Image: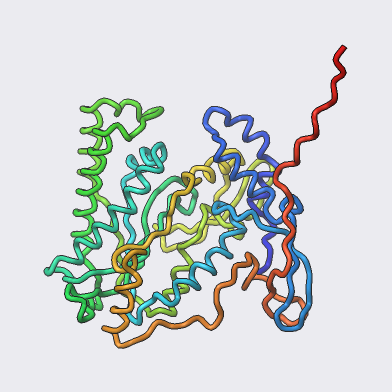
Amino acid sequence: MQRPPLEVADIVRAAGRKFIANSREWITRRHLKVLRAIVSCRTAALGYHVDECTRCGYSGHSYNSCRDRHCPKCQANARLRWIARRKKELLPVPYAHIVFTVPRRLAQLALQNKQLIYAMLLRLSAETLIEVARNPKRLGAEIGFFSVLHSWTQTMEHHPHVHCVVPAGGLSFDHLRWVPSSPRFFLPKGVLRKVFRGKVRAALNDAFDQGKIGFHGELRQFSQPSAFRAFVRELYRQDWVVHCKRPFGGPEYVLRYLGRYTHRVAISNHRLVSFANGEVTFRWRDRAHGSVERMMTLPVEKFLRRFLFHVLPKRFVRIRSFGYLANRRRGILLPICFQCLQSAPETPTTEAQNQDTAGLWTCPQCGGPMVAILRVNLPRRQPRPPPVAFAWG
């Protein structure tokens, strides 16, 4: 993989210190940790590992990665390993892609209550799909799917939404047959929109009654019960967008499709164009006008601020499985799905390797895959020196 000429790490190294000094009012230790990880990723600061070609035996060394999930350079490795594990779980049926979004005002509240609202969106979008699919008037079956939370637009503005990739069908309630969906659509998006909107409204009111929602800045006016109820009613009156694509390709296509949405960050290094005169220029796709590629230029501090909008809460799981693919049910129900479809899970030819370079680095001599055979990790912090001896008089 060719290294891009400009990276987010280069921008942080050049402007990070001034940006942090000007952002003391809102920047947190979590943000600082992410910036430090990005700067030190694949540099001598984190040590190195020795790689060896599995074909010709050529060896060389590479710097260690930071493994932070917000780092643009580390996500390709994690994505390959995740997709390799999911390969044996993909059913030989078409798949549907459904996206749940929320109004802009709720996105502002989510920015101040990430842990609560993000978890709420993942849980309620899943409950909506499962509930509508179980309705005999719709599909009348148990479904299973992957959900991925994204919090950004192409221009890195805050816009939380959930991507769901679902097999176009489900398991009958008696677990004896596979129930396929219509080839034209999976579930009616009008019904999904109404059910999802109602669930979010009820969950917001419950969270407010329990004192779980925080209000800061211009949203502080909604901290009073009457104002918050009016805020929620206004959200309910708006049109909520649930985007449903018609069922598409089989397992092979889904593997490539999932790679577009899992383990992504707000912006990749390959979208960066230039950094000059205190401004960052990057590419973005205008989805509202036929996905035309455009350029956007932002002051560097605004660029970094937008990037940090999308730092997730600590230990927050943004990729989740639901239905018969949930962890506690997958081992029992997934084999039944394959049995009903008269198929068997595909066994990967090569197991996903633990090394963070497996599958990405190729041998410069023969093009074979390189694997790490030795790792040298440098201490993150230097040990404290011994105390200076003091002679008592």
**Left or right: 143, with 72 as reference point:** left
Tell me which residue sits at (73%, 70%) in the image.
51
* Depicted 114 relative to depicted 86: above or below: above
Task: Compare residues 305 and 332 and report the one nearer the observer.
Answer: 332
Q: Nearer the viewer, residue 333 or 130?
A: 333
Q: Position of residue 323 (x, y in %)?
A: 29, 65
Name the image quarter holding residue 6: bottom right
In the picture, the quarter occupied by the C terminus is top right
Residue 362, quarter of the rendered image: bottom right
Give the quadrant of residue 55: bottom right
Foreground of the two, 8 or 277:
8
The spot of residue 333 in percent (x, y) is 29, 73
Residue 49 visible in the shown view: yes
Residue 195 drawn at (x, y percent): 19, 54
The residue sitting at the front extreme is 393
Image height of 48 relative to 220, above or below = below
- Image vertical order of residue 277 relative to residue 147, above or below: above
Outermost bottom residue: 342
Residue drawn 67% across the image and 61% down it = 4
The residue most toward the top is 393
Residue at horizontal 78 percent and vertical 77 percent from the top = 58
Please state, as top left, top right, bottom left or bottom right, where the N terminus lies in the image. bottom right
What residue do we see at 24% from left, 43% from top? 203
Where is residue 239 drawn, in percent x and y?
24, 49
Q: Foreground residue, 382 or 7? A: 382
For residue 10, say whether it is visible: no
| In the displayed structure image, the side of residue 306 where residue 101 appears, left or right | left
